[in-house]
Amino acid sequence: MLKIIKNKMEQGCKTSKYPAEPISLYKRYRGLPVINKECRDEIIQLCVGICPQDAIDPHNKTIDLGKCTFCGQCEVEGEGEFVRFSQNFELGTASRDALVTDGVLPELAEHSKQHFKKLFGRSLQLRQVSAAGCNSCEADTNVLGTPFFDLSRFGIDFVASPRHADGIHVTGPVSRNMTKALLDTYEAVPAPKVVIASGCCSISGGPFYGSDEIVGDLNSLLPVDLYIPGCPPHPMTTLHALLKYFK
């Protein structure tokens, strides 16, 4: 016990003070894109041609964050003339259409469903469902349970049983083999319940878009309440989205 107390005094508190204090991510992090609408057409077409996700609309000069894997090739090849990725990790939205952006996202709190805040504001229990994901989204979700993020201090936890949950947090492109398991899990959650689509795979299919083996759009199966884009979403992106939507 004395050794534990000594270690605590030497190390101090390792938990982030976010959201009470702002936090800066590593310089190489790619967050909300900044789009130059005055960019030359040839640069825009170059970015469109190299985008592996067909996420760039050259006519409206927007990027679909639901498809984007944040690979950064549009920034590299276009030398930042059309797209430049900022360090803004606040990417969550309450609607699929809002993910198609020109560099500005609506304030999540303004579009959150107030009855969810009233019901789950002090305690939110989620069941994680990996629907054929590659484990990147799942790994970065698990990180939220570490001392640095300490998700449970906000009254938010991931639980083992859907019967103990207020909603499901879905990752992966939803393969045909996982569809029934996902729907059964959703049905097991008591109403009222929420559905969170996390990562570009669950939102649009991600790199697997167009495959006959996946659903590729969670909203086509279940009514999605919260979208968290990324490949994978940074833990801070998930934390911000959960706090803004439910707190």
Image: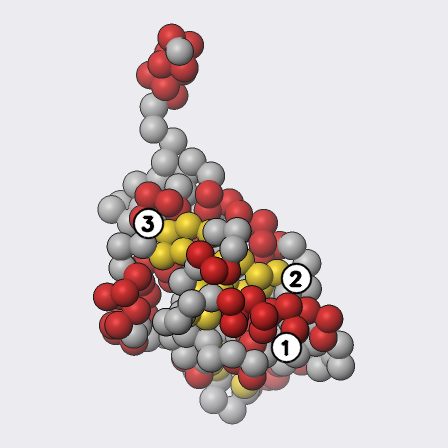
Is residue 150 depicted above or below 223 in this figure?
above
Q: Earlier in the sequence, mark 2 or mark 1?
A: 2
Residue on which the image places disc 2: 133
Q: Quadrant of the C terminus?
A: bottom left
Residue at mark 1 to residue at mark 3: CA–CA distance: 31 Å
Report which quarter residue 51 is drawn in. bottom right
Residue on which the image places disc 1: 216
Nearer-the-camera pick, 170 or 10: 170
Q: Residues within 10 Å of mark 1 (few under 14, many from 20)?
A: many
Q: Residue at x 65, y 73 (%)?
A: 180
> Looking at the picture, how far across and down is residue 89, in whole percent?
42, 59
Hey, which residue is sitting farthest right in the picture?
212
Which residue type does callout 1 highlight? Gly
Residue on which the image places disc 3: 155
Is residue 143 depicted above or below 116 in this figure?
above
Which-is-in-front pick, marks 3 and 2?
3
> Looking at the picture, how far across and down is residue 5, in whole percent?
36, 14
Is residue 25 depicted above or below 186 in this figure?
above
Q: Earlier in the sequence, mark 3 or mark 2?
A: 2
> Looking at the picture, how far across and down is residue 175, in whole percent?
70, 72
Colour scheme of the picture: secondary structure
Q: Residue at x 58, y 54 (%)?
A: 138
Report which quarter residue 48 is drawn in. bottom right
Mark 3 and mark 2 residues within 8 Å of each other at the beta carbon? no
Residue at mark 2 to residue at mark 1: CA–CA distance: 11 Å
Which residue type does callout 2 highlight? Gly
